[in-house]
Image (spheres, grey):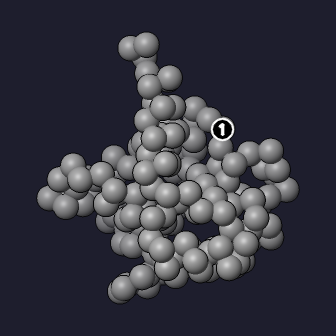
C-alpha cells in the first residue's frame, strides 16, 4: 500500500475483493475471472476519479494479470490458497502498515472486520462502498 506519509489527506481503501464481488449477485460465479477483471476496472475508474488510494486483495490470481500496480490501483492476491487466504493477507497488510488508523478496510465479513479493527483500521461495509462506487461512476459517466 502507498505509505501514509504520501497520502495523509487521501482515504486509503483496502478492499476484500471476493467479499465485494459476492455482494453483487450478478452471476459472477458463472465466470469468476471475468467478474474479477470487471471489479479491477471499476475500482481503477473509482481511484482515478477520486484520487483515493485503493488496494484490492483477491483470494486467487488471474493467470494473465500480475499483482502490483494496475492503473490507479494496487492489485494483490493472497499469498496462500485455502480458507480465509485473502482475509489473512488483508490482516497482514494492516498489521504491517505504519498508520493503520488511516486505512478503511472494505468487507462485510464480521470476523475480518473484528481482526482489522483490533489492529486500528476502520471498516466500511461492502454495500456502503458499492454505493460510493456507483455514485462516483454516475458523476463521471460520459453520458451525463
Q: Quadrant of the N terminus?
A: bottom right
Residue 138, horizontal then vertical, whole percent: 44, 25
Q: Residue furthest right?
A: 5
> Which structural element holds mark 1?
loop
Q: Answer with left or right where residue 82 lies relative to residue 68.
A: left
Residue 135, horizontal then vertical, whole percent: 48, 32
Residue drawn at x 40%, y 57% is: 20
Query: Can see residue 70?
Result: yes
Q: Nearer the viewer, residue 5 or 16?
A: 16
Residue drawn at x 14%, y 58% is: 30
Residue 78, horizontal then vertical, whole percent: 46, 76
Q: Nearer the viewer, residue 18 or 79?
A: 18
Q: Quadrant of the C terminus?
A: top left
Q: Name the residue tied to disc 1.
A: 51
Q: Nearer the viewer, residue 29 or 2?
A: 29
Residue drawn at x 62%, y 35% is: 50
Residue 49, horizontal then vertical, whole percent: 57, 32
The correct choice, above or below, for 56 with respect to 127 in the image is below
Q: Answer with left or right where residue 7 lies relative to residue 64.
A: right
Amino acid at each position: 500500500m502507498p505509505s501514509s506519509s504520501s497520502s495523509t489527506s487521501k482515504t486509503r481503501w483496502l478492499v476484500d475483493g471476493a467479499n465485494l464481488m459476492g455482494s453483487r449477485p450478478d452471476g459472477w460465479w458463472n465466470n469468476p475471472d471475468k467478474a474479477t477483471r470487471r471489479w479491477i476496472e471499476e475500482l481503477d475508474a473509482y481511484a482515478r476519479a477520486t484520487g483515493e488510494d485503493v488496494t484490492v486483495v483477491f483470494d486467487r490470481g488471474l493467470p494473465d494479470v500480475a499483482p502490483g500496480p494496475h492503473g490507479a490501483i494496487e492489485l494483490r492476491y493472497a499469498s496462500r490458497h485455502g480458507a480465509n487466504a485473502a482475509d489473512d493477507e488483508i490482516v497482514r497488510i494492516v498489521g504491517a502498515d505504519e498508520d493503520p488508523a488511516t486505512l478503511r478496510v472494505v468487507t462485510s465479513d464480521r470476523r475480518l472486520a473484528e481482526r482489522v479493527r483490533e489492529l486500528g483500521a476502520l471498516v466500511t461495509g461492502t454495500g456502503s462502498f458499492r454505493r460510493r462506487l456507483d455514485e462516483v461512476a454516475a458523476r463521471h459517466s460520459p453520458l451525463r
